[in-house]
Each structure stands twice: as structure tokens, then as C-alpha cells.
Amino acid sequence: MSPTPTHRPDGAKMTQLVKDRAPDGAQEPAVRLADVAVRFRSKKRDVTALTDVSLDVTPGEFVAIVGPSGCGKSTLLKLVAGLLKASAGQVRLHGEQVAGPRHDIGYVFQRAALLEWRSALKNILLQAEIRKLPAAEARARADELIRMTGLTGFEDALPHELSGGMQQRVALCRALLHRPPVLLMDEPFGALDALTREQMNVELHRIWRETGTTVLLVTHSIAEAVYLADRVVVMSPRPGTIQEIIQVGLPAERDYAETMGRAEFRDATTHIRGLLGTSAEDD
């Protein structure tokens, strides 16, 4: 099945691979970027990291962002988190202008960044301490997340006693403890081996389905992006802008092995690789 390109009001192309499951335009976006640009000044020259980026993300939607190295993918997440200020345009969360660091979001990085002297449970509960959540409520939330991520029995383990995948599970629990409406993930599985990464993909998709959290994921893996996301944003080389938005059209319930064999999956990954000039070996 050949992708049929259409056009969004913001000018970015959207490719429909199966059926149009675009977000309801009448609903207030969880995340809105409108004509956003980011420019950095240095002594030698000015650098434009992002230009003319417009994107709406519906509450509960999973959006993955792919593109060449240095195209501004991580910069885009920092804008949403309020860690970086746009040089032009607007960034909004649930209709509110992002004017500084946001403490209501969750953030997961490539490295788990756990405190080595704290157990898995105490690393997760760090969010509760910072946000001054009631102890009983925080523990109940932590226990539920531990169950969801398969960490039961490892609550007292220190980070060095955990595998890379288990450390990322702890980091994910920590990010979700305060029930953020938006979860930002910057290459969270990039340092994991292929088998563990596959397992984490399956777990993340299940957790997203259970929690209904809005997710923005940056990844270099095209297969990961297509498996996990409702839509895949393809960025151009720097200065980064949205080249196309791919509506993958996969069923909400996704068995990993079955999904890999679906025509929609093959069409989407092939199309994105064509846009980025990569092959399956690069994924």
C-alpha cells in the first residue's frame, strides 16, 4: 500500500497509510508548538536549531520524533519542558503558555540517572519527596507502578544491582509517580541491547495504554517509533523543521511480533527510511 500524502494547516505534510486517525481539532491540544524557532548565539556565528515548527498533540496521544542527528529533536523536548525558551513562536501545554521549567511533566532520559545510594523504591519515591505528596498515597502509587513495570521483588535493590533495562524501568516509574499529563522521553532505550529494548518497547506501550498519558518520544530507531506511536514526526536536517508527519494506522492493541509483520508497519518504516535516506541496517 503506497502512502498518500496530505497537508496539514501548518504546512507540514502528513502521510496516511491506512486510515485517518488524526486528532480531533476541536479538542484542546495537550501540547501545541506554533511557528517555533530556536536560535543559539555564539562568538563565531549564530546557529538555528529549529525553524517554523508547528505541531499539535492530542491528550493521550503517543507521538514519536525521528530525524538526523543534530536536527533539534531533543531541543524540541526541552522547549515543551520549559528548559529552553523559543526564539520565536509559542509553546503551550493544555492551553497554557510555557514560560519556564514545568514541574507537572515527566521526563525520561537515555541514562536512568538514579541515585546510587538509594534503593529502587526510594529512587521512585524521590518524586514524592520533592512534590511533598502524602506518604501513603505516594507508596500506593509506587507499588502500582512497580507492579506495572515488572519490578516486584526488586524494591530494595540498589542501582548497581539492576540491569540497564531494570534501571530504566525505575526511571520510568519515577517519572510517572506524580501522574504527569505529559511524558517526555529522550532516547530512553538507546543504551540497551536489542532484546531488552524490544521488551521495554512492549512494556512502554502497555503502560501508555493503561495510564493514558500523552507521550512525546525522541528516538533514532524508526522501527521503535512506528511500533509505539500513533504518529511519527520526521524532522529535516538542521535547521530542523517538520518534514512529514506519518499517521501509522496500526491497531491500538499491538503484539510485537505480529506488528512487525503487518503491511502498515512495513509501509511506514520503508517510507520514513526513504525520507531520511537510511536502510533497515541503520535502524
Image: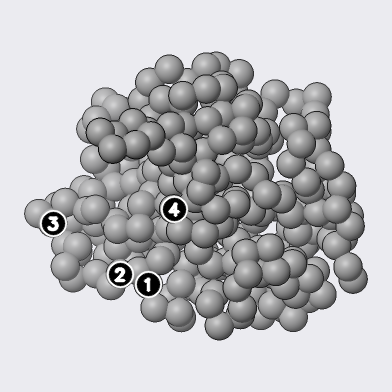
- The circle on residue 70 is 4
Tell me, yes or no, if residue 91 can be seen here: yes
Hey, what amino acid is under mark 1? Leu
- The Cα atoms of the two marked residues, 3 and 4, are separated by 31 Å
- The Cα atoms of the two marked residues, 2 and 3, are separated by 13 Å
Classify mark 3: helix, strand or loop. loop
Q: Are marks 4 and 2 in contact (CB under 8 Å)?
A: no
Q: Is residue 129 above or below residue 221?
A: above
Hey, what amino acid is under mark 3? Glu
- The circle on residue 21 is none
Percent position (x, y) of residue 224? Answer: 57, 66
Q: Which residue is mark 2?
A: 164
User: How many marks can you see?
Assistant: 4
**Screen quadrant of the C terminus:** bottom right
Q: Which residue is mark 1?
A: 192
- The Cα atoms of the two marked residues, 1 and 4, are separated by 21 Å
Q: Which residue is mark 3?
A: 116
> In the orientation shown, which residue stands out farthest toward the left?
117
Q: Quadrant of residue 27?
A: top right
Q: Judge left or right: residue 145 versus residue 44.
A: right
Which of discs 1 and 2 lies nearer the camera? The answer is 1
Query: Which residue lies at the image location 25% right of the left edge and 33% below the top edge?
Result: 43
Q: Is residue 262 above or below residue 251?
A: below
Q: Are marks 1 and 4 in contact (CB under 8 Å)?
A: no
Classify mark 2: helix, strand or loop. helix
Q: Are marks 1 and 2 in contact (CB under 8 Å)?
A: yes
Q: Are marks 3 and 4 in contact (CB under 8 Å)?
A: no
Which of discs 3 and 4 lies nearer the camera? The answer is 4
Question: Which one is nearer the viewer's eye here, 10 or 237?
Answer: 237
Classify mark 1: helix, strand or loop. loop
